[in-house]
Amino acid sequence: MKIALCGFEGVGKSFLTEEFHKKDFFKVKESARFLINLKNSGWLDKNNLSMSAFISNLKSLETTYDNNIENAIFDRSILDDFVYLNIYGNQKIELKTFQKIVDNFKEKHNCDYIYDKIILLKHSKDANHIKKNVLTDKERIYGKDVDQYKEVSHAWEKKFLKSSKKIKGLTKELKVIESYPDNVDLIKSILG
């Protein structure tokens, strides 16, 4: 089973990826975290970060298929990258182009869907959790206060859901669930 954990920053994707890895899932880390460090070294132009993340995540997806990895947990999907590119990046991918990428991937790997499940983890509404755990993280770049974080993450989720309805063959199942601390049994929610 190929499961992609999606959502705005700070919803617990990386933590959950590690938890699934403990349950014998092959772990595919979010490429943007690695790329952000390269950007600070001067190697990667900030404007190309989202496109580089998209290409890197697509390559990781290829690797799981090429190596016949059955159970994989992805920290982000290629749809996350598409949404980031179209909201924040100066390099947009047209919906038609993205659909072509999905179709080509499915044809190459002879599959009906790229992911078995895409899980959209909704941002927490708990102001204390956001303040203590999300906004204090130095890697978080969207949102300086709780209200701004909630507003920006809500807009991102809305764009994600709208885009997901237009893309055919990306996932067999799209599930939207609340993240921690609003939902303390996330793994059960994802697998159930």
Image (cartoon, rainbow, N blue to C red):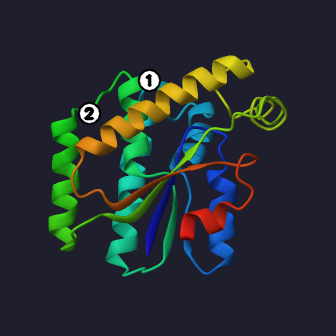
Do the CB atoms of the residues marked 2 and 1 lie less than 8 Å apart?
A: no
Q: Which residue is mark 1?
A: 88
Which numbered disc flags the more N-terminal residue, 2 or 1? 1
Which quarter of the figure has residue 24?
bottom right
- Assess disc 1: are there few (<14), some (14-19) or many (≥20) residues with their C-alpha within 10 Å of its C-alpha: few
Q: Which residue is mark 2?
A: 93
Q: Amino acid at mark 2?
A: Ile
Q: Is residue 171 above or below residue 99?
A: below
Residue at image coords 44%, 43%: 53
Q: Position of residue 164 (x, y in %)?
A: 32, 44
Residue at 44 percent across and 23 percent down: it is: 88
SS of the residue at dot 2? Answer: loop
Q: Is residue 1 above or below residue 51?
A: below
The one nearer the camera, 102 or 67, is 102
| Picture coordinates of residue 79, whole percent (x, y) | 37, 45
| Residue at mark 2 to residue at mark 1: CA–CA distance | 12 Å
Q: Nearer the viewer, residue 49 or 170?
A: 170
Residue 22 appears at what percent x and percent y? 69, 76
User: On the rendered image, what quadrant is the C terminus found in?
Assistant: bottom right
